[in-house]
Each structure stands twice: as structure tokens, then as C-alpha cells.
Amino acid sequence: MPVDHRPLAIFLMGPTASGKTASACELSELFPLDLISVDSALVYRGMDIGTAKPDAVTLARYPHSLIDIRDPGQAYSAADFVADALPAMQRASAQGRVPLLVGGTGLYFRALQQGLSDLPQADPAIRARLAAEAEQSGWPAMHARLAQRDPVAATRIGCNDAQRLQRALEVIELTGRPLSELQRGGTTAHFPWRVLKLALFPAERGVLHERIAGRFDAMLAAGFLDEVQVLRARADLHAELPAIRAVGYRQAWQYLDGQTDAAEFRDRAIFATRQLAKRQITWLRSDYGARRFDPDQPGLTARAAEAVRLFLGCAGQPAGH
């Protein structure tokens, strides 16, 4: 049986508020790991409280690559992530360390390991028109339109997931083909790392929901709205930028625009975060190769560490072991 000589890597995945960062830091105390963030919001500078970004003390002790690498006025795509993550992984492997990629952005994990489809570049005019149409009819109506044109994509995209709905409809207009069809054309090149996938998978959804609500209230107490006010003071930032569409920030922006009151703002932000967690859990369920761990059960670090220890110890054994 052939020996798999690829260097090793670890993916630590899970829904928002499941404790991924804490687990990654604890594992890095036990093994020679280099932490790499896999999060579409943590890339942005100045967006710290609302993204639950690790604080300066944590990052000083447990450095993470791919945090604070973009200005909120700049877009950041899955292709950008792959271009940034691969060199970070290569540096870790070259130094005899193991890259541990930690985060909840499933699209980034998939793009990294499976490759990207050949999709068209964004068209600002089409995006602006779609945003205006959504302003008039609402994103659920736009979702219904997508369901007619690309039912496969519609089942994967939530009816209020504005960013992904806009992109799916944009691709249809640019190519005349469904997004789901184009995505099947991604590269299947052999991934150059041998990967252990760990998934924090809460068994009790209610416990996760309570943690999401508690964390959001803690963000408010820590000055989340002040953080958003600073962003709003910049003339170049607006509500349709990818950074500002991040969960929590969109709702805060609407509240500060006077579109909602404080109670509705809180409810909307918590609901949107729960919906994000639901989508992340659905994506994790489809990854049958991931080892699942309930973060609410005692001994999470010990259980995850044992899986890592076995994985690192089996390097050089025949492929498939």
C-alpha cells in the first residue's frame, strides 16, 4: 500500500459561538501548530467587537495568520483567501510545524481543499440594480426568483442571505447559466496536505442559541455600537459593502440609521446570528470526513487532543490509515 508523504494539516470547524478559537489556542499549547484564521469577517481591521475577534493579549500569545489583513472598504473573496492561506500553510510546513486552520466560513474551507469554480468577476452595475430591486421587493422575493432560475442554489442559500443571493442572481445574468452548474466545474486537483478535520458540533441547539444571545449582549456592553459608529463616520463605507453586511454589523447599521429601535435591533442581530449558525451546522453535516465533538460536553480539549495526537503519530503510515 502506498505511503502518503504529504505534510499534515488540521481543519477546526464549527458554527459561530461554539468555542473554536479557545479550542485552537488550547491545542496549540500541546502541539507544534501554526494557527490560520478561516473567517470572512476577521480579515477586516477595525471590526473587532462585533466579529468576536481574539483580543490583543490572545493574539500576542497565540498568533493567527489572516486576521486584520483587509480594510473594511475592500472586498475579500474565497479566491483571495486561498491565495493567502496556501503560503501560510507552506511556511508552517517548511518550519516543521502543522497548520491548524480554524474558523466557520465553510466556503473558504471548501475552496481551499477542492478548488474554485471559474466564475465571472463581479459587475457593479448589475449588483447595484439587484440591490435596488431587493430594496423594493425584499430579499425573500429575490430568493423566490432564484428558486425559479436555480433551484439547487436556492436550497443552499437562505431567503435573507443578501450577499449570496445577489451573487447567485448576478452570475445567472452574466453567464446565462445557474450558479450551481458552474460550481460543479471546480478543480479536483489533489490537495497537497493530508488533513484531519475536527468539527465542534453542538448537540443541543438551545444551548448554542443561549450562548449566541449572551455573547451579543456582551458585545453591546463592550462598545459594539461605538465601533460601528466609527465605521459609519468614514465616507467611503456604506451598508452594501461585504464587510458591513457581516452579521451584526448590518443590523447595527440599520439601527443607527433609525430603521429599528434598540429592542428590534438586538432581536434581529441575534436572529441573524442564529441563522448563520444553522447554515454552518448544515454545511458541517455534509462533511462526512470530519470528527465531531460536542463542545458542551466535559473534556473537549482532551478528546480533541487525542484525535490530534493519533493523527500526528500516524504520519508516514500507508495512505488510508
Image (spheres, helix red, strand yellow):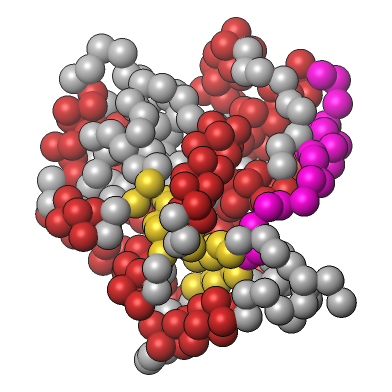
Is any atom of residue 272 visible in this view? no
Against 51, residue 165 (above or below) is above
Chief secondary structure of the magenta portion: loop
Q: For this rendering, which residue is in front, 162 or 306?
A: 306
User: Count the marks: how many?
Assistant: 0
Q: Using the image as rendered, state which of residue 40 and residue 264 is in the foreground.
A: 40
The residue at the far bottom in this view is 298
Task: Please provide percent x and percent y for residue 297.
Answer: 42, 89
User: Could you tell me which residue is drawn at 24 percent across and 54 percent down?
Assistant: 59
The percent coordinates of residue 143 (x first, y second) are 68, 37
Answer left or right for 236 relative to 144.
left
Q: Magenta region: which residues?
A: 175-195
Tell me the residue at 67%/61% (across/down).
6
Q: Nearer the viewer, residue 161 or 195?
A: 195
Q: Residue furthest top?
A: 125
Q: Is residue 177 magenta-colored?
A: yes
Q: Give the left or right position of residue 309, taking residue 287 as reference.
A: left
Image coordinates for residue 160, horizontal then vertical, percent: 55, 41
- At 60% from the left edge and 70% from the top edge, which residue is drawn? 196
Quadrant holding the N terminus? bottom right
Residue 184 is left or right of residue 251, and the answer is right
Question: Residue 215 is drawn in which quadrant?
Answer: bottom left
Query: Quadrant location of residue 140?
Result: top right
Q: Position of residue 159 (x, y in %)?
A: 61, 43
